[in-house]
């Protein structure tokens, strides 16, 4: 049990988002209470963008007027808030490296396989597959695809055939890792690696007939059932208007500082953007920088002053040129 209240953790997410599932399982692992704001699956997302300044990837964690982008950084925030049980156990130095692989390489092998017509139809509400897709589901599939084209335009996407071969190799390796009876991927304790792999398996399992491919990997399926038993913590629903009000009325921000020797000075006008996909830049004033995190101060006419946090790894900082 945790002595401090945790219901100030607000996750902007939607239930079908794999990376949201990653965070929901972490809430369960740490027995945290949290609030869910359900955001639109596709653009426009005006309330989310008011908080982030343009970043549109899902999920986003809000704590007052501090906004944390990217699940890798959010995991670190949760570990600071509730250190036990840890997401980064002693003796598992490769856990974050495996997590990074799962969040990118494994995920982008899963996506083309899952998003075949039968899988996409199941994910979008037609579990019977593509045999008799309704006009509404077909329209939803087309809208989702159109929204994601510019979002992932910077990626070199695999064909379905190529992705299927890669995914088979990855799943077989994970299954072999677990075949000795260990409880979790790197040993007796769960780590960030388990949650990053788990959201990929969850995504496959939800994809109707596509999910049958997991039957070849019994150790991996048994492991995923163990991870799912952590649950999702204590969830309550709030509206995006309530979340914006909380941000606007926050008394201050989490402590932050720009460390010397990292190439940027406090107060610099900069933009921050992901380097892989969803590369929409966010502009602001640099108020925090370390080897792990970059923090921008930005002002929004609806919300006031916000601090928007990004991981340092996987994101690029650019200083704005003076006029």
Image (cartoon, grey):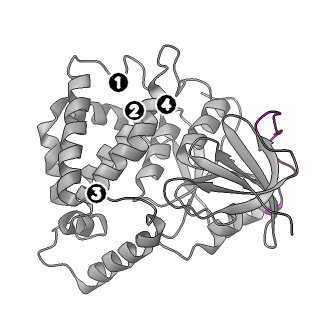
Q: Which mark is residue 96?
A: 4
Q: Is residue 242 left or right of residue 126?
A: right
- Does the segment drawn in magenta span residue 207? no
Q: Is residue 64 left or right of residue 212?
A: right
Q: What is the C-alpha distance between the residues marked 2 and 3? A: 25 Å
Find numbered disc 2 in the image and state the secondary structure of the residue it sits on: helix
Q: Earlier in the sequence, mark 2 or mark 1?
A: 1
Magenta stretch?
248-262
The image quarter containing residue 86 is top right
Residue nearest the observer in this picture, 110 or 86: 110
The label nearer to you, 2 versus 3, is 3
Q: What is the C-alpha distance between the residues marked 4 and 1? A: 14 Å
Q: Earlier in the sequence, mark 4 or mark 1?
A: 4
Q: Earlier in the sequence, mark 3 or mark 1?
A: 3
3 is higher (above) or lower (below) than 228: above
Find numbered disc 3 in the image and state the secondary structure of the residue it sits on: loop
The label nearer to you, 3 versus 1, is 3
Q: Residues within 10 Å of mark 3 (few under 14, many from 20)?
A: some
Q: Which residue is the site of mark 2?
A: 194
The image quarter containing residue 76 is top right
Q: Residues within 10 Å of mark 2 (few under 14, many from 20)?
A: many
Q: Earlier in the sequence, mark 3 or mark 4?
A: 4
Q: Which residue is the site of mark 3?
A: 158
Contact between labelled residues 1 and 3, with CB atoms less than 8 Å apart: no
265 is higher (above) or lower (below) than 129: above
Going 47% across and 72% down the picture, which residue do you hit?
A: 42
Contact between labelled residues 1 and 2, with CB atoms less than 8 Å apart: yes
Q: Residue furthest bottom?
A: 135
């Amino acid at each position: 049990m945790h002595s401090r209240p945790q219901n100030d953790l607000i996750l902007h997410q939607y239930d079908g988002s794999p990376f949201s599932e990653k965070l929901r399982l972490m809430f369960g692992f740490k027995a945290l209470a949290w609030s869910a704001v359900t955001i639109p699956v596709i653009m426009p997302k005006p309330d989310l963008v008011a908080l982030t300044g343009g970043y549109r990837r899902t999920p986003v964690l809000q704590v007052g007027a501090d906004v944390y982008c990217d699940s890798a950084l959010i995991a670190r925030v949760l570990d600071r808030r509730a250190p036990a049980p840890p997401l980064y156990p002693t003796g598992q130095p490769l856990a974050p490296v495996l997590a990074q692989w799962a969040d990118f390489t494994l995920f982008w092998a899963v996506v083309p396989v899952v998003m075949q017509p039968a899988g996409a139809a199941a994910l979008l509400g037609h579990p019977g597959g593509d045999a008799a897709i309704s006009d509404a589901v077909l329209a939803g599939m087309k809208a989702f695809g159109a929204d994601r084209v510019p979002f992932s335009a910077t990626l070199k996407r695999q064909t379905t055939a190529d992705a299927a071969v890669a995914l088979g190799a990855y799943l077989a390796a994970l299954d072999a890792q677990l075949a000795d009876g260990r409880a979790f991927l790197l040993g007796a304790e769960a780590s960030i690696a388990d949650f990053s792999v788990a959201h990929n398996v969850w995504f496959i399992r939800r994809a109707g007939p596509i999910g049958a491919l997991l039957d070849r990997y019994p150790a991996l399926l048994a492991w995923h059932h163990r991870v799912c038993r952590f649950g999702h913590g204590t969830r309550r629903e709030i509206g995006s208007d309530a979340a914006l009000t909380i941000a606007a009325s926050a008394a201050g921000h989490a402590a932050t500082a720009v460390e010397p020797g990292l190439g940027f000075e406090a107060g610099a006008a900069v933009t921050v953007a992901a380097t892989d996909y969803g590369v929409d830049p966010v502009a602001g004033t640099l108020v925090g920088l370390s080897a792990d995190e970059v923090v921008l101060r930005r002002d929004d006419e609806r919300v006031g002053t916000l601090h928007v946090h990004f991981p340092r790894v996987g994101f690029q900082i650019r200083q704005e040129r003076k006029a």
